[in-house]
Image (tube, rainbow, N blue to C red):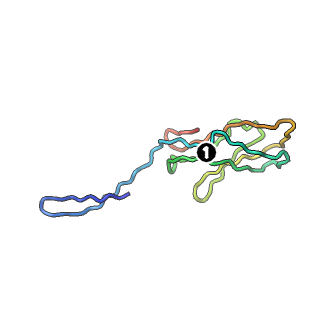
Amino acid sequence: FEIEVVVVPNDHFRLIKVKIFVRDVNDNAPMFPSPVINISIPENTLSNSRFPIPSATDPDTGSNGVQHYQLLNGQGILGLDMVETPEGEKWPQLIVQQSLDREQKDTYVMKIKVQDGGSPQKSS
């Protein structure tokens, strides 16, 4: 972001360039694209199989952006990992940790918390 300012002293005219850097503050919480995410996993899925979850977004940048995902109630059946791309994007993935049996349980409901790295931290 650049602004050119003209300063006109009494005896002559000078043009100077002033650069203003706008620092990001942590004024946004990271958010998932939808409050409910449905994922279908076949019951014959092998342990350690991974299923991508839509990433949360945060308009803030750097450490004020998305930093961490946490599975709050995986019930020992599912886990969560985060893969970071070379560009710095963070992609959450569900990991099947135990065998699934649809006849015993056909639905798992869990919550995933996403946090930024600002101070104070914001999450959803």
Nearer-the-camera pick, 102 or 113:
102
Nearer-the-camera pick, 22 or 37:
37
Residue at 87% of width from left, 37% of height from top?
A: 103
Residue at 74% of width from left, 47% of height from top?
A: 95
Looking at the rendered structure, the kind of residue marked 1 is Pro
**Farthest residue in the left direction?**
11
87, above or below 29, in the image: below
Percent across and percent down for residue 89 are: 59, 54
Percent across and percent down for residue 6 are: 24, 59
Q: Left or right: 97 with respect to 4?
A: right
Q: Count of labels shown? A: 1
How many C-alpha atoms fall within 10 Å of the one at disc 1: few (<14), some, or many (≥20)?
few
Percent across and percent down for residue 93 are: 69, 48
Location of mark 1 (residue) = 33
Q: Quadrant of residue 107?
A: top right
Image quadrant holding the N terminus, namely bottom left
Residue at 60% of width from left, 42% of height from top?
A: 114
Percent across and percent down for residue 88 are: 58, 55
Q: Left or right: 11 with respect to 67?
A: left
Image quadrant holding the C terminus, namely top right
Residue at 65% of width from left, 41% of height from top?
A: 70
Q: Secondary structure at mark 1?
A: loop
